[in-house]
């Protein structure tokens, strides 16, 4: 089944079952500023999973654009991707395990015509702190899944988040597997058998973890499901990898036409990375050395490196991005809104990186000279990693250059440095992924509220052209990105600070109303993603000062912020400025 057909079938099915169909949110999170990118369908819904009322009710479904980079170095094998689409449906305190499982089963077996004998499931096995999920097990049995096709696994496999070690809403999940082997599946289900591929995960958020090892039942029990579009579509088409589907083949065929060498892994990396980069660029991100811009830069430069490995000369990513737009423009019209700007940003970054590659080669020649003068014949792992991390040289290139110069590379110490880098990246990714749901603290609410006051203050001082382009919140500070062509003066920063502190001092009441997007515009609300909203939106009002479309959460009065101070104002990327600020004590206003 082609991906576009799977998208439509999925949304039509859940619409028929009373779900409101949401458009995909931006890859840059709007309501979950603790993450760099939207990494799951649930991210745009965090406030509602935490108890906020959604303007479109308690049953929702969507096809959400997602980006994960924690396994970027594994991209190129049969399964890993950075950008992907997640099919998801949610119950916000409405139906629970029975209805969720029954709908999943019906969609797979009736709508997609998957034979029951090709399905198997896993359920949570229970432990000392939380009970075995017999409820899900009984539902699967009632639907005809035989006992030998149901496996019980622990918290590392059948719990979200995995391990259950982080505080916040969480619970058991039941995962659905599809048999991809050519021969009939063995009667007894073995989750470790690679021919059984997970296609759908139903998470049942029924507990709140205190962080001290105890789990308390949640007042609002939610269902959060996810099915990867690419993987499921590949399976239904009988393809062995996602790269063999219509979502990748036109890109890979064009790469073939440009290349003089052949390397399947490099072709897949380029196809994956240009797909991801095109979507990130379409959502307003530009290459830079920080945050989303840094990830985008890394994707583009990694694609260029592998292009050189295939013998591709000159700029080529712009050509591939046009193919990506052609594949996806019907499902995601945003891609064709500003294609000239998008392609120009890609061209500029590729040209800049070509110069960086030249600089990396110069750095290698310096290293070569140093080694020759000391009669050393081995390039240390730390030097090889420096070439990789700073100049984008993959270890293969360094080894080839070293061989030509009569040297070898200490690959073991390089691999150690590389693994340390990977582990740190993954730890950061895991924390960011959990951040939105796990750190829904009072301090986060205050900081999120402060971004509204800051947004309006910037518009007052700098002009109505100012729009939020990203934000990030930690427990200590807020970070706010906005479009503005030049640095703020000391006077402008002070004016913004004074305006925000004046609104805090006034202790303005904060409330929200539900209305249509058109009504919100007439009301004077600030809005960011016009085509991302549904029929109804929430408009949060802070006294007579600020009106903004947002999902929350916020404090009840601005006085709870106590004070506001800008720590730093700097460039984030071309045309984008960044403010870091703190809230807290009234002394900040002095």
Image (cartoon, grey):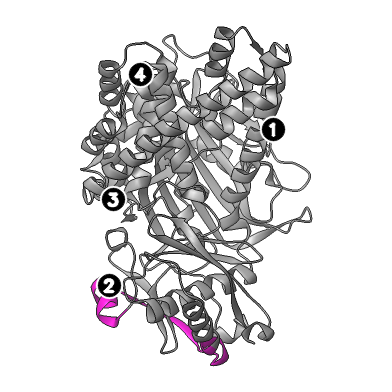
Mark 1 burial class by Cα count in 10 Å: few <14, some 14-19, many 20+: few
Asked which secondary structure carries label 1, the reply is helix
Give the residue drawn at x 56%, y 34%.
390
Q: Are marks 4 and 3 in contact (CB under 8 Å)?
A: no
Q: Is residue 171 visible?
A: yes
Q: Is residue 40 visible?
A: no
Which one is nearer the viewer's eye here, 67 or 91? 67
Residue that badge 4 annotates? 239
Mark 4: give few (<14), some (14-19) or many (20+) Cα within 10 Å.
some
Residue mark closest to the camera, 3 vs 2? 2
Q: Which residue is mark 1?
A: 420
Q: Is residue 91 above or below residue 189?
A: below
Real-space Cα distance between discs 1 and 3?
A: 49 Å
Asked whether the beta carbons under mark 4 and mark 1 sit within 8 Å of each other, the answer is: no
In the image, the segment drawn in magenta is: 502-524
| Residue displayed at 38% across by 20% down | 267
Relative to 225, say whether 265 is above or below. above
Which residue is the site of mark 3? Answer: 16
**Disc ID at residue 516:** 2
**Rendered residue at 42%/86% (across/down):** 545
Q: Closer to the N terminus: mark 1 or mark 3?
A: 3
Q: Residue at 33% x, 41% y: name it.
A: 348
Q: How far is mark 4 from mark 2, CA to CA?
A: 43 Å
- Camera-side mark, 1 or 3: 1
């Amino acid at each position: 089944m082609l991906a576009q057909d799977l998208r439509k079938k999925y949304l039509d099915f859940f619409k028929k079952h009373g779900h409101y169909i949401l458009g995909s949110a931006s890859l840059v999170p709007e309501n979950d500023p603790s993450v760099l990118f939207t990494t799951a369908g649930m991210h745009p819904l965090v406030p509602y999973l935490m108890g906020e009322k959604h303007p479109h009710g308690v049953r929702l479904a969507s096809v959400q654009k997602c980006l994960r980079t924690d396994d970027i170095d594994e991209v190129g094998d049969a399964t890993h991707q950075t950008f992907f689409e997640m099919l998801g449906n949610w119950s916000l305190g409405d139906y629970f395990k029975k209805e969720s499982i029954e709908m999943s089963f019906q969609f797979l077996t009736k709508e997609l015509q998957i034979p029951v004998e090709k399905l198997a499931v896993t359920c949570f096995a229970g432990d000392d702190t939380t009970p075995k999920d017999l409820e899900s097990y009984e539902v699967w049995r009632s639907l005809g899944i035989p006992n030998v096709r149901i496996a019980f696994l622990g918290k590392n496999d059948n719990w979200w988040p995995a391990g259950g070690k982080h505080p916040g809403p969480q619970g058991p999940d039941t995962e659905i597997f599809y048999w991809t082997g050519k021969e009939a599946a063995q009667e007894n289900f073995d989750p470790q058998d690679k021919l059984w591929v997970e296609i759908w995960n139903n998470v049942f958020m029924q507990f709140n973890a205190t962080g001290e090892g105890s789990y308390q039942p949640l007042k609002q029990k939610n269902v959060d499901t996810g099915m990867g579009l690419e993987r499921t579509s590949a399976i239904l088409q009988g393809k062995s990898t996602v790269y063999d589907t219509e979502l990748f083949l036109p890109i890979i065929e064009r790469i073939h036409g440009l290349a003089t060498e052949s390397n399947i892994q490099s072709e897949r990396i380029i196809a994956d990375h240009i797909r991801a980069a095109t979507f990130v660029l379409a959502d307003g991100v530009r290459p830079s050395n920080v945050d989303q811009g840094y990830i985008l830069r890394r994707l583009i430069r990694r694609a260029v490196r592998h292009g050189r490995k295939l013998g591709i000369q000159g700029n080529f990513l712009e050509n591939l991005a046009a193919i990506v737009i052609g594949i996806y423009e019907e499902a995601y019209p945003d891609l064709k809104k500003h294609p000239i700007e998008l392609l120009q940003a890609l061209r500029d970054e590729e040209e800049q990186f070509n110069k960086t590659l030249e600089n990396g080669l110069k750095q290698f020649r310096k290293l070569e000279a140093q080694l020759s003068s000391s009669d050393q014949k081995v390039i240390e792992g730390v030097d090889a990693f420096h070439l990789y991390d700073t100049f984008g040289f993959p270890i293969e290139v360094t080894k080839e250059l070293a061989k030509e110069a009569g040297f070898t590379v200490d690959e073991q110490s390089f691999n150690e440095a590389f693994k340390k880098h990977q582990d740190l990246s993954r730890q950061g990714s895991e924390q960011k992924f959990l951040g939105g749901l796990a750190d829904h603290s009072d301090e986060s609410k205050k900081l999120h509220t402060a971004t509204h006051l800051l947004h309006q203050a910037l518009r007052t001082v700098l002009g109505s052209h100012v729009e939020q382009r990203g934000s990030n919140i930690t427990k200590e500070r807020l970070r706010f990105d906005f479009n503005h062509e030049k640095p703020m003066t000391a006077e402008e920063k002070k004016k913004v600070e004074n305006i925000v502190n004046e609104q805090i001092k006034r202790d303005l009441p904060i409330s929200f109303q539900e209305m249509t997007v058109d009504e919100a515009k007439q009301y004077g609300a600030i809005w960011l993603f016009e085509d991302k909203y549904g029929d109804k939106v929430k408009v949060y009002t802070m006294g007579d000062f600020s009106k903004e479309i947002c999902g929350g959460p916020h404090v009840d009065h601005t006085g709870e912020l106590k004070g506001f101070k800008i720590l730093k104002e700097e460039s984030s990327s071309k045309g984008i400025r960044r403010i870091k600020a703190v809230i807290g004590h009234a002394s900040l206003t002095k």
